[in-house]
Amino acid sequence: MKTANPFASKVMEMAERETHGWKMMIGGKWVEARSSKRAVTFNPAYDQPLAEVPAANAEDVADAVAAAKAAFPAWSRLHVDERAKYLQRFADGIRAWAREFGMLDTLDSGNPLPAMIDDANKGAGLHDYFCGLGMEMKGRTIPTPGGGLNYTRQFPFGVVGRIIPFNHPISFAAGKIAPPLVAGNTVVLKPAEQTPLSAMLLGRLVEEHLPPGVVNIVVGDGPNCGAPLASHRDVRRVAFTGSVEVGRSILASAGIKPVSLELGGKNPLIVFPDVDIEKAAAAAVSGMNFTRSQGQSCGSNSRVFVHAKIHDAFMEAVLTLASKIKVSLPELENAQMGPVVTRRHYDRVMGYIESGRKEGASIALGGTHSAAAELKSGYFIDPTVFTGVKHGMTIEREEIFGPVMSVVQWTDEATMLEEVNDSEFGLCANIWTNDISTAMRFADDIECAYVWINGHGNKRFKGAPFGGMKSSGLGKEHSLDELLSFVQEKNVNVRY
Ligand code: ADP
């Protein structure tokens, strides 16, 4: 295996050993796909095969769902404090292996190592948060005529299907199973086919810390593994993070069950002329996620609307900061920015860059494969900034999911707001101004569900509901709303 960090080889050996040769965890056992089919996952930094993993299909999904269904009665009957004890030990296990999980994600996804170690700890942290919220799954009493009591209680759904994307593998695999588990559901988790390794190693902690079948991990692609999971009759609740297109198909095929969707974004960062230019520029660069994920995050502020009066000074500050970002092999201990996830995705992002050029925008930075010799074979794209972008251009409308920022100039506030809202997406928005009235007015009028004033949407807080409007999704995460979305209410009448 090619690598610039000897720890990478050690982690691959350790994870292969711990997962019995990259097997899936179903019903507390390590299994191959029933078909014995395997798929190859690639290291995007070198364009080289990294590991062979099972290619699960509907049969394996059925096994995982059956195991989760069998585990449900005992798990759901535990008091929430008892479930929390299990989950806290599980979370401690994640923290103890944070560097190992981080390295696996770096090798599999190309995201820089320090950010991926941080991601592992974040995923574990969500267990702390949701375990602490457990007692909030409360019922109500309702006044009724005559002698009696009418009350409600909250019950878990049963088996939950959790389907996650490639961009934050361990953070999502670890963190997004916390609320359904705390609520008393059992889970079938499906990581993205591009980045399954850290979820597979998580199976080792499932084996050690949780009763068999409480968490099951199926590894496969979307059509053969994700689709049968979402539509399985015994899966009573589906939670999906990924593209709008797949979100739509899941809604259409899931049947009668609640579905939550955390989908894409084309998030505006709006700069008014009264701001501290250096601070606003720093937020635009940081919130674009060039570092952490090469822009491959739904919360990236990929559309920047800057007032014409300060445009040139703002751009100078943005370019100074963005050009300092160092693209390197992502497994280096101090890596800032790595490659995008696959060759196919690289071609897609490059296609968008080409469309920006053709449609008349100007490249102020990047737009090319990173130059360093050791990066030649990987899917590296330099941080890219377009200026002269007009509303309606492809790069201003579509989610590129790569390191590409589009800067639009504005002069008239009403026209700018119209352009900002003329988008299918409605996830994050960022408003930069020192005028309180303008800030509050825009926060009201903007059609996005997660708004930052003088900041950027990648700063998230536990407890602050995160989720999209319009085609950006359904439902809220990282908050009590998310926990309560994994229980259903039962009403009971008592006569006395
Ligand atoms: P991205 O573009 O970020 O890869 P996708 O929506 O394509 O997002 O994939 C996100 C997750 O959804 C992955 O785990 C993928 O395997 C899964 N997936 C893809 N197609 C389907 C489908 N038809 N049904 C269920 N899951 C799917």
Image (tube, rainbow, N blue to C red):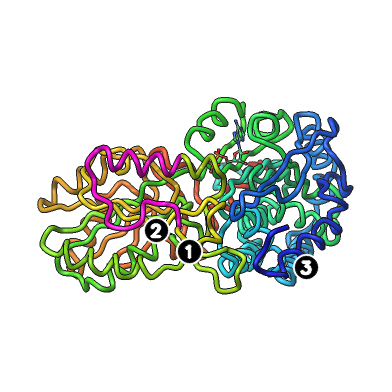
On screen, residue 274 above or below 164: below
The magenta span reads 348-370
Q: Earlier in the sequence, mark 1 or mark 2?
A: 1
Q: Position of residue 249 (x, y in %)?
A: 54, 28
Q: Secondary structure at mark 2?
A: loop
Foreground residue among 5 and 147: 5
Q: Disc 1 to disc 3, how far (Cα)? A: 37 Å
On screen, residue 174 above or below 31: below
The quarter holding residue 455 reads bottom left
Residue topped by disc 2: 383
Q: Nearer the viewer, mark 1 or mark 3?
A: 1
Q: Residues within 10 Å of mark 3 (few under 14, many from 20)?
A: some
On screen, residue 299 above or below 240: below
Asked if marks 1 and 2 touch (Cβ < 8 Å), the reply is yes
Foreground residue among 242 and 220: 220
Residue topped by disc 3: 89
Residue 96 visible to an observer of this rendering: yes
Residue topped by disc 1: 327
Amino acid type for the residue under numbered disc 3: Arg
Residue 362 is inside the magenta segment: yes
